[in-house]
Amino acid sequence: MIEENSLSHNQRNSSSILVDRFGRVHDYLRISVTDRCTLRCTYCMPAEGLKWKKSEQLLNNDEIVRVARIMAEMGVRKIRLTGGEPTTRPDLADLVARLVEIEGIDTVSLTTNGVLFARSAQLLKQAGLSGVNISLDSLNRETFKKIARRDALNRVLGSIDAALEYDFEPVKLNMVVMAGVNEHEMLDFVELAKTNPVNIRFIEYMPFKGNQWDPAGVVSYAMMRERIEQTYDLHAMPDTFIANRVAEDFMIPGFCGKISFIASMSRSFCATCSRLRLTADGALKACLFFPAQAQLRESLRSRATDALLKLEIMRAVFAKPEGHPAPAELTALNDLSMIEIGG
C-alpha cells in the first residue's frame, strides 16, 4: 500500500479525475470477476493450463463494488465484466444489480464465451445488464474444438440466441482471426449480420504470455477488410475514423447488423486509450500489455480510506505508458496470460 506523501503534487491534485500524463481521460473499467474458464482457447490460455486462484485470493462482491464506486467518483462511466468466464461466478447477477445502482455508472456489460450464458441470460437482464459480447471463433465444430480445446459450439450458439431473445443491446460477436486456422470463415460470420441485429467484430491475433504467438498467424486489418470487400460493400458508420475509437464500424446495405475491426496490432489506438483493467485478484492494469501498476486487494483488506485508494489508482494511471512497443516485444513485457488479465 502506498503512502500519500509518496505521490507528487500533481498526482494528489488530480485524484478526482482519471487523466494520465498524456492527457488521456479514462472512463471505462473492465473488471475480471474470476480467473476460471470453461474453455481453453489457444490464444488465451497456455497449453499446460493454469493453477486457479483460491477464492480468498479473489475480490469479493463488496470489494469489487467499492472499487467501482470509487472509480465512478473519479470519472468511470462504463463497466464491463470479464473473466476467465464470468458466468462461472454464482453471484454474478447480484454483482450486476449492485453495480448498475452506482451513481455515475451508465452501463454495465459482459464479455462471455457463451458456454453457460444462456442459462443465466434472463436473470442478468433483470439485474440490469445491458450489452453482451460473446466470443465465437468458428462456426465449424471441428475448428471450434481445435481453438477452444472443448466441444461446446452448440452451447455458444444457444447463448447467442438467448442474448437476442432477451434484447440485450448491443450483442457483439468477437472473432479472433488467425491465419491458417479460421480466416476462411470470415464471410460466414459476415452473413450472420444479414438477418440478425449483431455486431460481428474481427479482432487481430495478439501476443500474450504462453499463447505461442507467431506474427505469421496475424491477419491484419487491411487483409481482413480487403477479403470482405471482395464480396460485400462496406460503408463506414458515422464517426468510424475519429481518433478515440477502438473498433472501426461498417454497415452493409440491407443487413440488420454491422461489421467491425479491432486492429490493436496494425493500427494501435494507444494514443486515445480510455480503458483500465481490474484483475480478479485486485491488480489494476492501466495498459493491457504491461504488468499491473497497482495492487488494490491489500489496501482494500487493510481498511484503507477511499482517499488513499484514489491516490493508488491515480498513481497507476500516471504510470500508464504512452503506447505499447512492436508486437514481437509484447510477450516479454506482459507477465500474465490473456485469461489472467480478463481481456
Image (cartoon, rainbow, N blue to C red):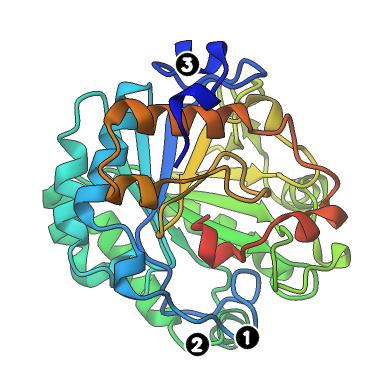
Q: Position of residue 2 (x, y in %)?
A: 47, 36
Position of the N terminus, as image quadrant, is: top left
* Nearer to us in this view, 258 or 292: 292
Q: Amino acid at mark 1?
A: Lys
Secondary structure, mark 3, is helix
Give the label on residue 24, or none: none
Dot placed on the residue nearer the N-terminal end, 2 or 3: 3
Quadrant position of residue 123: bottom left
Q: Which residue is mark 2?
A: 150
Residue located at (37% from left, 22% from top) = 74
Regarding mark 2 in the picture, which secondary structure is present there? Answer: loop
Q: Nearer the viewer, mark 3 or mark 1?
A: 3
Q: Is residue 250 left or right of residue 166?
A: right
Above-or-below relation of 335 to 28? below
Q: Does residue 245 lie above or below 149 as drawn?
A: above
The three-letter amino acid code for the residue at tag 2 is Arg
Whether residue 77 can be seen here? no
Q: CA distance from mark 2 to mark 1?
A: 8 Å
Q: 281 or 120: which is nearer to us?
A: 281
Determine the image quadrant of residue 140.
Answer: bottom right
Q: Is residue 57 left or right of residue 328?
A: left
On the picture, is 333 further left or further right than 244?
Answer: right
Q: Circle 1 sits on which residue?
A: 146
